[in-house]
Image: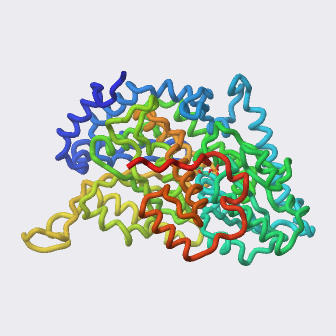
Amino acid sequence: MFQLTRSVTWQALKELQKTTADDRISDYFAGDPDRFDKMSLRVGGLFLDYSKQPVSDEVLETLIELAEHSALVQRRAQMFSGDIINVTEDRPVLHTALRNLGEGPLKVDGKDVMPEIQRTREQIKQFSEAVRIGEWKGFDGRRIKAVVNIGIGGSDLGPNMACRALLKYRHPELSFHFVSNVDGAHIQKVLSGLDPATTLFIVSTKTFSTQETLLNAHTARRWFLDNAGEDADVGAHFIAASTNKAAAMAFGIREENVFEFWAWVGGRYSMWSSIGLPIALSIGFEGFMELLEGAYEMDQHFLSAPFAENMPVLMALIGIWHINFQGAETQAIVPYDQALHQLPAFLQQLDMESNGKSVDIFGHPVDYKTGPIVWGQTGSNGQHAFFQLLHQGTRYVPIDFIASLKPEPGVEDHHFALLTNMLAQANAFMEGSLKGEEGSGSRPDPYSCPGNRPSSVLLLDELTPRNLGALIALYEHKVFVQGVIWNINSFDQWGVQLGKRIAGEISEHIDARSQDFDASTQRLLALVRGHFTPPDREPNGGKEAKGEGARPRRKKRQA
Ligand code: F6P
């Protein structure tokens, strides 16, 4: 059996970690005037500068060897061609098919899936245009003015992030709102001030069994019926994006208003599917297609570029150097672009739900680190929140800076300040501050910054649908490459099913003194019980909630 950590290349990288441990990144520049040109590359409207990363030429060459000795070429071909690479769920992984603009069939179980993908795209086109031009009317004949997406995880984060990022392209007479948390305060805040007669709800849920989404959907429907319409009117105000048409129709959504997608699209990879409906409604179908085209162009780059010039592969390998050899536990995402303020949250699910695994594809425990903790916030705000730790703390935190070059008209001065702040920070992280620059004298200088702290800068020419699509596909493929090298399944998420199941068990015991839980949970349940009486409506948002993840009660663990 292949042992990654015993491979020659892995051992060579371990040796290189030792021999380069005292290198300073800034010395690499001093020793090589061509470093920037060698360690930067452009793909379409994206430019990546990774020259401030702590990698010597030899380290980079050896990392590329690691990729070449991995199953990357084969697994990449398998993914794009629809082979079953999600082995624990026995599914292909074909989010790339959703943006496939090439010719030729793509077969799943012997059936070409491109016709149904194109059919759903046409359904999205027709529907989004009907709503945007006012042809789609609410029950009292008025056009839709507010769109509320009800979903969580991949059924929220992707469309939410994209709608926010592309706000300047938004239809001027439509407002967009996203409800995800089961905390009633979330839906109450969103619904307050909306007119049910001109509000369209999109129930976005791959399985149509997620407790939070169903509870929110039922509450939205009750709000609609209490404040405006009749049962017969629900069809004009509720649509669904789901793989579970039957459950959507049982909720009261008309069959023709269920925008289907498929089991071989992972939730965190689904914004290219009908889960992306809010994006098409907001920026128009043409804009949505540009988003897909940008992702498709990145797919083609990922498929064809040699590893040494392959943006997703290089980002993945630098991440592996940080995580498996430099001891990084986290990866910071710092967009210097307020329109991208939801990007860190999106990338958090994409990366951590994909590569937060501790067994390989054969179910054997791994003996190396896998997915990092992904976190972040926009700059320049981060400079006033956590940059102190990044500059002078005891932790090693690689940073991805992301920005768009083109300023918005009227605020060019702000944009110049934004970008110069970012460049200054990336430089300061690398150079640090010399002794005495901020402090004084020969005493130990608490004021100086050690520097030698790693970052990459990723520049978009402009934040357009095309470049955003390429950016998201870039990170999808970076996560995929790391998963292949770590030999894990990046496309299942059994860890979240456990939580869903226990939540169901606990909510069923809220009024029983169950001995099935630990003393802490029992006592906390008693506190919770004392503070409210469960609402009369069914727990978990209705019978369809007994979907995936609902299992018979757990037997108490033997002491
Ligand atoms: O977080 C677990 C998860 O299954 C995600 O993978 C998914 O995006 C989210 O819950 C929502 O699931 P659904 O779209 O089925 O409601």
Image-based side of 330 in relation to 210, left or right: left
- Determine the residue positioned at 44% across, 60% down: 376
- Determine the residue positioned at 61% across, 64% down: 182
- Determine the residue positioned at 32% across, 45% down: 322
Colouring style:
rainbow
Q: Quadrant of residue 326?
A: top left
Q: Residue furthest left?
A: 442
Q: Is residue 64 above or below residue 465?
A: above
Image-based side of 448 in relation to 526, left or right: left
Q: Position of residue 529 (x, y in %)?
A: 56, 71
Any part of residue 12 in sight? yes
Q: Nearer the viewer, residue 16 or 503?
A: 503
Q: Nearer the viewer, residue 444 or 294?
A: 444
Q: Nearer the viewer, residue 1 or 442?
A: 1
Image-based side of 196 in relation to 344, left or right: right
Q: Quadrant of residue 90?
A: top right
Q: Position of residue 295 (x, y in %)?
A: 60, 43
Q: Position of residue 460 (x, y in %)?
A: 52, 52
Any part of residue 463 in sight? no
Q: Position of residue 29 (x, y in %)?
A: 26, 47
Image-based side of 504 in relation to 108, left or right: left
